Image (cartoon, helix red, strand yellow):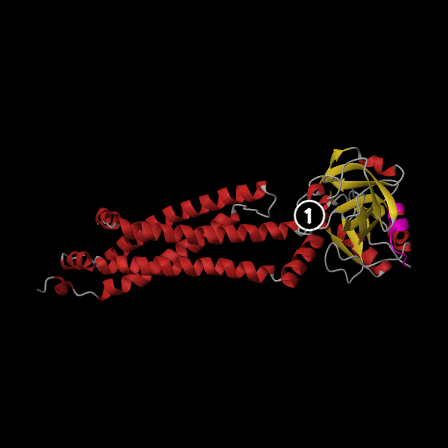
Amino acid sequence: MYVIALKMLFGDWLKYLGLIVGIAFASLLICQQASIFLGLTLQTGSFIRDTSQGDLWVMDPQVRFSQDSQPLRDTIVQQTRGVAGVEWAVPLYQAFTRGQLADGTRITLLLVGLDDATLVGGPPLMEQGALADLRRDRGVLIDAAKAAQKLYMKRGGGREVQVGDHLSINDNDAVVVGSYRARDSFFWDPVIYTTYRRALQWAPRERNLLSFVLVKVKPGADLDQVRSTIERKTGLKALTNQEFIYLTANFILYATGILINFGMAVALGFIIGLIVAGQTLYNFTLDNLRHYGSLKAMGASNGMLARMVLLQALIVAVLGYGIGVGLASVMGLAASQLGLAFAMPWQIPALTAAAILLICMLASLLSLIPVFRLEPAVVFKG
């Protein structure tokens, strides 16, 4: 009986291909949009991952995401260092500010100031120069990957900012002493590193300029106890790297509407797959009603006919899913080469497979209605 079901499926090539194309398109849309969504979500925490040498981030309770700097008192650093279980605590300055390239091009940049003594919090991978070069007079580091896009001098033939070039930060002269490679970020403004004291000198005048305190907990010390002590002594909030990443992603997703937009795209893929597969499989079943009627007349039960239809749907689901996810992977590979957000862990293909199976099962149940209602005698009339 199952061989007959396969012959019925492969016998009508037009509807067979229509089913596969519909399922493949639904798989592609669900898998691709979910992967882009996850890629964007991961990018929101890229700065935190690049600055993860510590265990805790001490910040103002009103901070909503990684680039949302709320100034703190400088005394917070010493207070934090005095907490039992803290191995070290260093200041970190971070704020958006104005800049100007040597040719006069104006830019907005994220200025990051690292602790002068330790340079903790610096970029993880240097492209040119060394992190210690920041101690040179007026030294800054630029992102090598974003230089061509965000630090591009249009005049004089046009070229990107390079090591040795000068630029102005809040009307202060800075010299590029090195470049680094960072993770792809959701935020588009270039990130420029310098020392903490120099960043305070270049920053607009305010009473408080400290952005965060990075804290390393001593080996063997209880992280939760150290955190609660810091929060009690300072009145501030202390988050782990993962908690800060989650806070940032949660704010960006809901504040920008990305979650809703990509959720609608995934839902659209599911609905399209259900409509295409349901309609095509339903029409396919109607065209073969006489065959099902003959099988019923020969004694085939409704359960057997249901298993035949489910087998047909399963074959289509497997082939369409494989083609759709394969295309999504190829497109994701191309997107990654272009620097676009895309991440496809095994959970996304697994969830896509579950969605496609659900689509095909629902479509099968819909197409089984006329089969179950069919009277075998109708086939032999006339």
Residue 311, position in %: x, y?
30, 51
| Residue 217, magenta (yes or no) | no
Asked if 81 appears above or below 131 in the picture, the reply is: below
Look at the image and tell me in which quarter the C terminus lies.
Answer: bottom left
Amino acid under disc 1: Ser
Task: Tally the marks.
Answer: 1
- Judged from the image, the secondary structure of the residue bearing numbered disc 1 is helix
What residue is rendered at 88% in x and 36% in y?
Answer: 136
* Residue identified by numbered label 1: 46
What residue is rendered at 43% in x and 54% in y?
Answer: 26
160 and 241: which is toward the camera: 160
What residue is rendered at 61% in x and 52% in y?
Answer: 40
Residue farthest left in this picture: 382
Residue farthest top in this picture: 129
30 and 147: which is toward the camera: 147
What residue is rendered at 24% in x and 50% in y?
Answer: 12
Residue 25, position in %: x, y?
42, 52
User: Does residue 31 appear in this view?
Assistant: yes
User: Does residue 87 appear in this view?
Assistant: no
Residue 351, position in %: x, y?
48, 52
- Write down the region rendered in magenta: 198-206
Q: Is residue 131 left or right of residue 19?
A: right
